[in-house]
Every structure is written in C-alpha cells, then in structure tokens.
Amino acid sequence: MIRPTRRVFGALAATLMLGVALPALAQDIRRTPVEGFPHAAAWRLDDGVSRPVVVILHGADGGTEAGERFGPILARLGYVAVGLPYYSPDWGQYGPPKALPELSGSFVDIPVDQLARLRDAVAAMPGADVERFGLFSGSKGSEFALIAASRYPWIDAVVAYTPSDLVWEGWGLETLEAEGTRSSFAFDGQALAFMPYRGFVEGLLAGDAADLRAIHENGRADHPEREAEARIPVENYGGALMLIAGEQDAQWNSARQARNIVAARQAAGLPTEALIYPEAGHDLIGDGGPRQAHRSGGTPDANAAARADAWPRVTAFLARALRPAP
C-alpha cells in the first residue's frame, strides 16, 4: 500500500484551504447549533428580525473553520448564516487525528441532498426565512453548491469562488490503491458520475512538489468521453449565480471552469455574473490585504487586489438576490 506520511498530509491539507475571511466582531450575534447536524451552527443578529438564510460550504480543508470565520461576517450583513461542516480529513496513522469524528473522513460520496434536510432544520429556527435561501461556497464547496443548485429549485442565490464545472474524483484512505474509482459527491444515495484525476496519489506523496492543477487538467484530457456525464448541469439552475476565479489558480483551472459554466448558462438564456482576475490565484475569498496562501497561485498583491474588487460585488449580489419579494 502507498502510505502518505504526516508531513505529506500536512502539505496536502495546506494546499486545499478554502481561504481566510475578514475578522468580524461577535457582538450582538447569536450562535446556535443546528439540531441533527454535528458541528453545524447558525449565526444571526439577535434582534428578532426575519432574515434570509445563507449556507457556508467549506472547501477540501473541511471542518468548522469556514463557518466560524464567515458566519459572523454574513450575520452582520443581515443573514442567518449557517456553517455546514461535511468532511473532516482522516488519514489514519499517516496523518494527525481526525478532528470531527462524526463527519466523513474521506472526500468520497459526500451526500449533496443533506442540504435539503439542513434547510428543514433551519426552518424551525427563529428568524430564519428559508424562502430566501443562498449558498456561499469556495473550491470543493463550490462544486457542492453548484450540484445542489442544479437540483433544488428553492436555492435562490449562489456565490461560487474558484468553481468547478465538473464533479471530480473523490479521495481518502480507501482510494490510495484504487484511484479513479470513487466520486466526490452523491445524491439520493447514488454516487455521481465524475472526472478522474491523473496522478493524485503521486501528488500526495510529492507534497509541495505536486502540481494540483495539472492533476486535474491531465485527468480531464485523459477522459474526454467522461466530460458530458461528469458535467454539472448548471443550466438547470434558474437562480442568481456569481462566480469568482483567478487565471493563475494553482489548485485547479477555475477560470476555465467558470467560463464553461457561463457558456452553458448563456446557451440556456440564463445570466451569470462572473469575475475572472488575470493575475490572481485561488485565495480570493473575503477581503483583506496581501497574505501568504500556500499553493494558491497568483501573487499576494494580485490576490488582495482581486479580493478588494470582488468582495463589495459579492455582498451587493447577495443583497439583490435575497431581498424580500415585492
């Protein structure tokens, strides 16, 4: 068996971070666990006003960090912000202990339809208006969000940072000697058709020397016959969509993937707001000045400039898409 080391696991986890958000004050914000969803929580202003719901979908880093960072920010902007942890990396003896034992330890067959159950649970919370329902997502979370949006008509708005137009291969301990056999996502108990990688395990062993973008692009080039089945049918989603991507993304080719999404929706007569930054990489979520982001691509200055341009557009987009009906 090919065995990743602790050092390799740490490098992989660092390369797959969703991003770092703006700091936010927690004053006047209530945090409430979501019943039936381990480690999920909702943040809202404690003022009794009925507000739209925005679900935060983390990337391949997993865990609770995305919700804990973005929940207070989105709550202060006027939403019931719900962090949905759905994955907690588990590499057994080859990595650090699994942080959240109740969650899937492999990024394999993650059930997208858990979002419908989450909506039902949040609907019972005071002040949560699930008739105005949005998703705020990044990287693998954007893949999750777009799959869900293509299937659920009650999703009104999606913000998808560094998105994918395809469902990709999954990974985990059980896939180390079975590359190309498992999907990242499932729906209604069925694994979704996916695009395989080329050389994921080699990349895992290579650590910092791995070219994650090439692992995706080469896999796609190897399997043109799987493109149609693996494609996320974004034209089935009639709601508001904003994409944010960087041409220099070192994780995967999010700019190409965003353009494919725009083209598919244009062909169906559906508008899409797409922000594609020529010099930026993967580290585009939130706001803030230059910062180091492991294996993001782009430069800290270019990424900061893209965030500064995108963030007010993202907040304005959500306000438009989730405003009360006239």
Image (cartoon, helix red, strand yellow):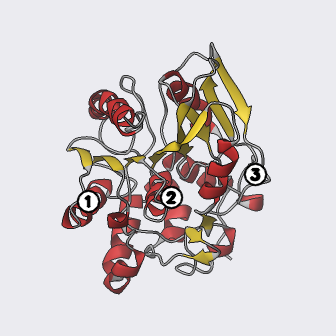
Q: Determine the secondary structure under disc 1.
A: helix
Vertical order, 64 against 102 (above or below): above
Tell me the mark number nearer the camera, choosing from 2 and 1. Answer: 2
- Percent across and percent down for residue 53 are 54, 38
- Report which residue position mark 1 lands on: 256
Residue 201 lies left or right of residue 277; in this view the side is right
Alpha carbon separation for disc pair 3 and 1: 34 Å
Alpha carbon separation for disc pair 2 and 1: 18 Å
- Packing grade of label 1 (10 A; few <14, some 14-19, many >=20) is some
- Percent across and percent down for residue 73 are 51, 25
The label on residue 315 is none
- Percent across and percent down for residue 28 are 63, 14
Image quarter of residue 4: bottom right
Sequence order check: which comes first, mark 2 or mark 1? 2
Q: Amino acid at mark 3?
A: Lys
- Report which residue position mark 2 lands on: 144
Residue 304 lies left or right of residue 59; in this view the side is left
- Packing grade of label 3 (10 A; few <14, some 14-19, many >=20) is some
Say which of 11 and 256 sits in front: 256
Q: Is residue 108 visible?
A: no
Sequence order check: which comes first, mark 2 or mark 3? 3
- Report which residue position mark 3 lands on: 98
